[in-house]
Image (tube, rainbow, N blue to C red):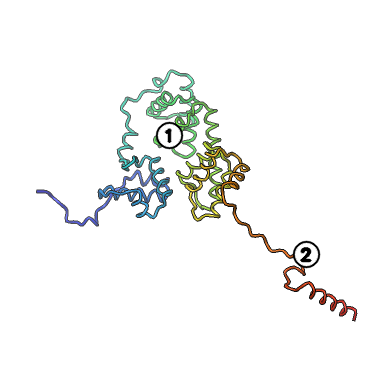
């Protein structure tokens, strides 16, 4: 014997955690939200699917789907493996992030390193008006040990959180700390170099988006490709612009298309626009040009008039006679 509901599955509801609606969804691209909601539906119904199924159901291109999956992974909403997409339990992750399986310690127990204590004291006074919780003292001390940040870098981390009004969001601060550590930031000079590189990549991305008339910011997937072109390949806009011009000769307007072009050039050892143009001239069919038709000679009135030269002499003679009379 078992109990069941008479209500049709058509009226079933799929719950979405409030933290997703309040904290996560506003930061996601619309297509990523669309994909996440559809994945919740497929998971609830136990429906098997392929990436091709997702592309067909949501009218996504391969680049769109890859970009959305990357954004959902970055937001810790899913874990993607070769054959499986696992949807994380947001509420459970939130609980784990707030719970620390250790006792909080008092400020004077956190660290015996004077410079680190001075940094913690600065953070307390600047951003918490002297009332920073003991949990933050413990967390900051852990980050000092785990990431080996210089004291100045830790202060800059909380300045970043304050700039975007995220001082109450422990997850946001943790994400910054993890990202900086992943980019091998330890000293303030490391941080300055990283920010300069990031700023240059962002400006490059904005310039590309403007050239392509996208009318939006780049997705995480597109930004990752721009970072590869700029950092790994060492290409500036003068080179990337040549690849973008290919869109004038092709209906395939996608970052994956441009990535293939730039990767081909990089693998061929090409670094400058001049080298690329020479390479293109040797390996590609040149673009046909259609120069405007020019008449062999004479003034402007004579060109393209359709009047034979002998007839023009007769006309000029008649005009002179008319003036004399």
The image shows residue 295, relative to residue 129, as above or below, that is below
> Seen from this angle, which residue lies furthest left?
1
SS at mark 1?
A: helix
Could you classify mark 1 by the number of other residues whose Cα lies within 10 Å: few (under 14), some (14-19), or many (20 or more)? some
SS at mark 2?
A: loop
Residue at image location 49% in from the left, 52% down from the top: 253
Residue 36, given in percent of the width and then of the height, sits at 35, 48
Residue 142, given in percent of the width and then of the height, sits at 40, 25
> Seen from this angle, which residue lies furthest bottom?
325
Residue at image location 77% in from the left, 67% down from the top: 300
The residue at which mark 1 appears reads as 173
Q: Nearer the viewer, residue 309 or 114?
A: 309
In which quadrant of the rendered view does residue 297 lie? Answer: bottom right
Circle on res. 193? none
Residue at image location 43% in from the left, 32% down from the top: 178
Q: Nearer the viewer, residue 204 or 245?
A: 245
The image shows residue 143, relative to residue 279, as above or below, that is above
Circle on res. 297? 2
> Seen from this angle, which residue lies furthest right?
324
Could you classify mark 2 by the number of other residues whose Cα lies within 10 Å: few (under 14), some (14-19), or many (20 or more)? few
**Quadrant of the image for the C terminus?**
bottom right
């Amino acid at each position: 014997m078992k109990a069941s509901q008479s209500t049709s599955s058509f009226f079933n509801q799929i719950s979405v955690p409030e933290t997703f609606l309040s904290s996560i969804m506003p930061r996601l691209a619309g297509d990523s939200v669309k994909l996440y909601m559809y994945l919740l539906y497929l998971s609830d119904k136990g429906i098997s699917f392929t990436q091709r199924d997702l592309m067909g159901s949501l009218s996504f291109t391969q680049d769109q789907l890859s970009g959305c999956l990357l954004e959902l992974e970055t937001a810790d909403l899913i874990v993607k493996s070769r054959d499986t997409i696992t949807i994380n339990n947001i509420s459970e992750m939130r609980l784990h992030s707030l719970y620390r399986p250790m006792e909080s310690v008092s400020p004077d127990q956190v660290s015996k390193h004077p410079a680190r204590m001075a940094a913690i004291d600065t953070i307390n006074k600047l951003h918490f008006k002297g009332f920073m919780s003991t949990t933050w003292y413990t967390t900051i001390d852990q980050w000092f040990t785990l990431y080996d940040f210089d004291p100045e870098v830790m202060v800059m981390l909380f300045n970043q959180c304050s700039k975007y009004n995220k001082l109450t969001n422990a997850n946001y601060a943790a994400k910054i700390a993890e990202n900086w550590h992943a980019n091998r930031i330890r000293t303030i000079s490391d941080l300055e170099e990283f920010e300069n590189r990031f700023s240059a990549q962002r400006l490059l991305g904005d310039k590309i988006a403007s050239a392509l008339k996208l009318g939006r910011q780049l997705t995480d997937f597109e930004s990752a490709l721009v970072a590869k072109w700029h950092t790994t390949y060492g290409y500036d806009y003068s080179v990337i612009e040549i690849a973008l011009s290919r869109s004038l000769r092709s209906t395939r307007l996608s970052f994956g298309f441009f990535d293939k072009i730039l990767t081909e050039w990089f693998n061929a050892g090409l670094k400058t626009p001049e080298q690329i143009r020479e390479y293109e001239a040797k390996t590609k069919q040149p673009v046909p040009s259609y120069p405007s038709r020019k008449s062999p000679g004479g003034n402007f009135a004579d060109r393209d008039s359709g009047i034979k030269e002998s007839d023009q002499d007769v006309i000029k003679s008649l005009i002179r006679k008319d003036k004399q009379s």
